[in-house]
Amino acid sequence: MRANAFFLGILLVLGQAAVAAEKPAALGPAGRDEQGRPGRVHTVTAGDTLWGISERYYGTPWVWPSVWRGNDDKVANPHRIYPGNRLWISDGEMRRVSDAEAEALLGRQADQAVPAALEDTLAAQNTEDKKDWDIFFSAAEMTGLVTQAELDSAARVLGSSRDTELYAHMDPIYISLGEGEVLPGEQFTLFRRKDLAYDPETGKVFGRFVDVLGWAEVTEVHADSAVAEIRQAYDAIEKGDLLVPREKPVRELHFVAAPEGLEGQILFLADQRTSGAGEDVVYLNRGEEHGVQVGQRLEVFRSLTSVVDRETRQKRQLPDQPLADLLVVKIGPRTSVALVTHAVSDLSWGDHFRRALQQP
């Protein structure tokens, strides 16, 4: 996953799934930890998300960021869970465990049932109206899109005082902005252009895919150029790479209702893939000009063809097939970025989205 041109700080939301499963799934088997505290071992299946698992075991999707806190050493990226992973879930923690750890936990059979919902023990943490909750997230800068106009206005890396052709973290670089164009302390996202991006609705070129390389902060300004220090590098940076003003990630997100009739298509999937699944990022060909706002819930769907009833020989239209739930996390004038909070199928370029049935 990587970011878009408005710019380029995609949000990994620690929050709520947009739509709950149609039927509540069975809870995992009960066990006890080393201190004798009861809990359950959950085996991840396709389509599981941490907020969905939180809903199932705690009775609310909102608590899992707090119970994951302090477990970064257990899971390098807790937003990435895969079928077959095993999680230990108790009233105070949710963490990934190895198969051996899971068997040890299950070997200490609980002498009393673990409650289906543990939300009573966490009620003090969840007294606010859920609709007004902040969703906390960490920011990651990733691949995205830029329009031709944004490319035309981008600054360039001119070189470095270091005797090397590739630049990395903390290296000084010269950029093509001088007095009257930039000030010390301003920050810029560094990126490299890639292939053309086509709007699935019109077939016209929308812009270009880009690889985000990192970001830099201006330290000196001179007449025709400036010096910036690379604060973070995701890849090697070189002469000729481009810069645009960096938009600092927002720290809070609120759910808002999407307008009636909001529809569009997937413009781009992360990492230039042709399909994607849960907890990925997609780019949409609708933005602020079309009524899109951060915090809106959207639904990806595919329209199915009609079939002929063999008995009556009448043509019957099949219902739309829901594919995924989205949460808008970034907007620009004509495009937006959404997190896939739940998916039942791979997504593809050109898939249609609309306002989700469930709204805040």
Image: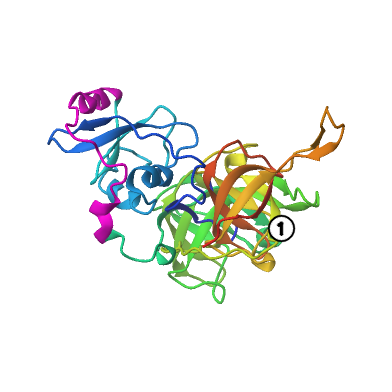
Q: Residue at image x 58%, y 40%?
A: 271
Q: Position of residue 308 (x, y in %)?
A: 83, 32
Residue at the image point whose x is 33% and y is 32% from the top: 28
Q: Which residue sits furthest bottom? A: 180
Is residue 328 or residue 229 the one in the foreground?
Answer: 328
**In front of the other: 281 or 121:** 121
Q: Is 219 situated left or right of 322 in this image?
A: left
Quadrant hosting residue 264:
bottom right
Q: Is residue 106 magenta?
A: yes
Q: Residue at x 27, y 27 (%)?
A: 102
Rendering coords of residue 78 (x, y %)? 37, 42
Magenta-drawn segment: 99-124
Residue 219 position (above or below residue 48)? below
Name the residue that disc number 1 marks.
Answer: 148
Residue 242 visible somewhere in the drawing: no
Q: Position of residue 70 (x, y in %)?
A: 25, 47
Asked if residue 180 shows in the view, the reply is yes
Residue 47, percent across and down? Answer: 50, 36
- Identify the colour scheme used: rainbow
